[in-house]
Amino acid sequence: MATEQATFSGTAVSDFSDSAKKRRIVRQAFLYLFLVFWALAVLFPFYWMLLTSLKSQSAYNSEVQPKFYVDEPTFDNYKEAFSAVPLARYFANTLIFTLVTTGLMMVVIILAAFAFARLSFRGRNLLFTLFLSLMMIPNELVIITNYVTITNLNLRNSFTGLILPSITSVFYIYLLKENFEQIPEELYKAAKVDGTSDFKYLRRVMIPIARPTLVTIAILKVIECWNLYVWPRLITDDKSYYLVSNGIQEIREHGFGRDNIPAMMAAVVAISVPLVILFLIFRNKIMAGVSRGGIKA
């Protein structure tokens, strides 16, 4: 009798385990199907942009129904995009703006995050709280203030006017401060006992430890600068200082017009490719840096 009960109990446990395993497989299957569908929905606009850029204008205009393939791909649209306006110069301007802005911002946020994370001074917590409250101010109001300031300083149509409002970020200071605070404070106290200066400790200890977060911030700032649109449109009307974001509007207004959609898509692809390559190369560092910056040790 005891043997029969044990066998029945073992069979019930086995059936329950098989049922739970099947439910888990079904849930995972639905999850993967949803992720595949979502990935296709996100990637389809990029595919359509690339596909359209390879079509001739006549072929594009003659399509009664959109085609999801190209019969005769052409790269003439890319040549037209770079010849209609000085897009290469806009690329160079954007590269200068991006590198200088990112470099200056890294210096500012590293020093600010170190001060809030390690230095002791009266009103530090209150000042940091007030600093964080700036994130609640709409960007439109900040842009208006920056525009008035830059205009009063006669810095319109200059790289200085483009760069100055972008050399700091409350969010990046907060992210880096949280990362710095994960480093044991005993290291800082031991360094001070040995007579190490704050700058030397920051350079030799904190920056190497926080390198993943710093790399992530730098990459995100590069992407932000490359995609900047509103501020360059406001502060520059001299084509010598146009960025690639200005170049798109310049192409539509004074290039080949609004009707040549394939050439427009070619220009957008050319502008987007550097950022896509940058993200694909550093995607693991971006994810690791963001995750590390948001987890307390």
Image (cartoon, helix red, strand yellow):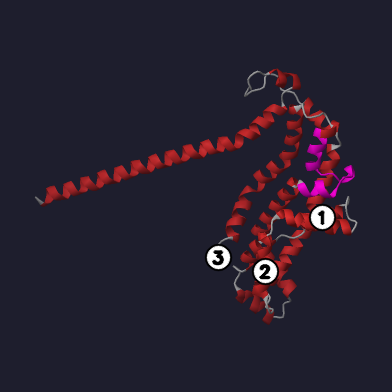
**Sequence-first disc among 3 and 2:** 2
* Residue at mark 3 to residue at mark 2: CA–CA distance: 22 Å
Which residue is disc 2 drawn over? 130
Labels 3, 1: front one: 1
Residue 158 falls left or right of residue 273: right
Q: Work out which residue is located at the far bottom of the displayed protein and give it.
A: 193
Q: Which amino acid does label 3 sit on?
A: Lys
Quadrant in the rendering for residue 176 = bottom right
Q: Residues within 10 Å of mark 3 (few under 14, many from 20)?
A: few
Quadrant in the rendering for residue 148 = bottom right
Q: Does the magenta stretch include residue 46?
A: no
Q: What residue type is labelled 2?
A: Leu
Which residue is disc 3 drawn over? 296
* Residue at mark 3 to residue at mark 1: CA–CA distance: 38 Å
Q: Residues within 10 Å of mark 1 (few under 14, many from 20)?
A: some
Which residue is disc 1 drawn over? 147
Instruction: Give the magenta part as a residue range.
Output: 230-252
Disc 3, SS = loop
Q: Does the magenta stretch include residue 239?
A: yes
